[in-house]
Image (spheres, helix red, strand yellow):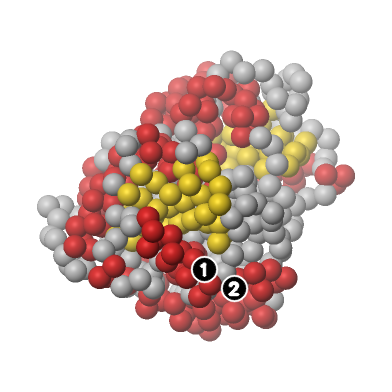
Amino acid sequence: MRILTLAEFYPPVIGGLERHAQRLSHELVRRGHEVEVVTLSSGDLPRHDDDDGIPVTRVGGWRRILDRFYEDQGRGFHPTTVDPGVRREVAEVVERFRPDVVHVHGWILYAALTRRRRDGHAVVVSMHDFGLACPKRNQLHHERELCARPGPVRCQVCAVGHYGVVKGVGLTTGLRLSTPLHARADRYVAVSRAVKRFVEKAGANRDVPVEVVPNFFDPSGARAAIGAPRPACVPVEGPYVLFVGALNAFKGVHLLIDLWRRRRPAAELVLLGNRRADTPDPASLPPGVRMTVDVAHSDVMAAFANCEMAVSPSLGPDACPTTVLEAMALAKPVIGTDIGGIPDLVVHGRTGIIVPPRDGDAVGDAVEALLTSPALAASYGRAGEAHAENFTVGAVADRLEGVYARAIARRRAGGREPRPSRSPDRAEAARPGSAPETSASAASVT
């Protein structure tokens, strides 16, 4: 099968989605597929590149004129509508490569959905967040509560409050005008049931099938970290609790810092991740807390291997954090919040502890419970290690190959969907290791 990976960004640009696109591309090549990558230009990276045998093309398009509106001007994402320049450059690669499937990650999907059905290739869109229906991508209304009623005016007011007038109006209007294009996809893949529910409720996918296929981790990275010495980004000795992710309020970083300032658990708190606009000033951190940005992934995995536990205290609906899977793969218990895709990954009372979002004391109680009961922590870690086998890159690639086959069949049938023997939801529920529906405590983060 010839597969074109279309991703907003791709390594060496650092990020979870970027690593996801890269690992999946290499796994597909390992399985005998032919893969090429198209991604957005970034900094001074070359237009044509080679990623260990995978051709990579970086495209600029008209979006470059918007760079001054972005927080990181070297990483201006694709707009929420068609960029004629990006569309033209992607079409040139499609014309040359002749893929069977274009697998899209991010708002760059609008460069793929302008193609007509007669073009032959199927289009599969991975929804790594809530961006198909939310211009902020996080499903949070004014950063206070889950958005239950997305709509033109409501979304625009919320986006303007977050981005400012020019960027907020532009993103919201573009997303609204682009909605009819969504019907040109052949399959949507949601990384969690929370993403699927929100997008379907918003009507953003226009009746195109949505399947739930979670994120994955690379087991080779976990294997290499077993027995690794402590990296420089963690304490030389003594217990520590590890957070990995964007260093911002949405991910719960400020909640953790406040917890260590108020209660000071009997372990250090280590924060590893990428800097954001609201990343705390390192000079403001209380005793027992350290923060390091832009850590190499091998050091992140070594940090997981030596920690007591991992925490993922997101305040909003984190779609499907890969860091949770990496922690479980290294037999570490995970404390996570009951929101978004985290309950799809962490089995409460078996692989870790699920707590209400925005409840710092509940996080503190869970941390102290695991620190004072090593046997319980070890039990959760062992169960998590076994559970993580359902989320390896190989296990998820198996499922995606099925998605590709169904998307191709749908495209060849002119967009008609054959009647399945059982619904995708039932198939998902029957899959070993699948998690139960999110509990009612995830309904609000107020």
Q: Nearer the viewer, residue 444 or 418?
A: 418
Give percent across and percent down for residue 440. 43, 55
In the rendered structure, the answer to whether residue 5 lies left or right of residue 153 reads left
In primary-sequence order, the first of circles 2 and 1 is 2
Residue 425 has which mark?
none
Q: Residue at x 22, y 54 (%)?
A: 406
Which residue is situated farthest in the top direction here?
A: 227
Callout 1 secondary element = helix
Residue 243's place in the image compared with 333, above or below, is: below
Residue that carries the numbered disc 1 in the rendered image: 86
Give percent across and percent down for residue 380. 48, 26
Q: Which amino acid type corresponds to the residue marked 2 in the rendered image?
A: Trp
Regarding residue 161, the answer to whether it shows in the image is no
* Marks 2,1: beta carbons within 8 A: yes
Give percent across and percent down for residue 1. 29, 47
Give the quadrant of residue 42. Answer: bottom right
How would you rate the neighbour count of disc 1 (Cα within 10 Å): few for under 14, some for 14-19, many for 20 or more? many
Regarding residue 406, the answer to whether it shows in the image is yes
Q: Which amino acid type corresponds to the residue marked 1 in the rendered image?
A: Val
Q: Nearer the viewer, residue 15 or 446?
A: 15
Residue that carries the numbered disc 2 in the rendered image: 62
Q: Residue at x 69, y 21 (%)?
A: 230
Callout 2 secondary element = helix
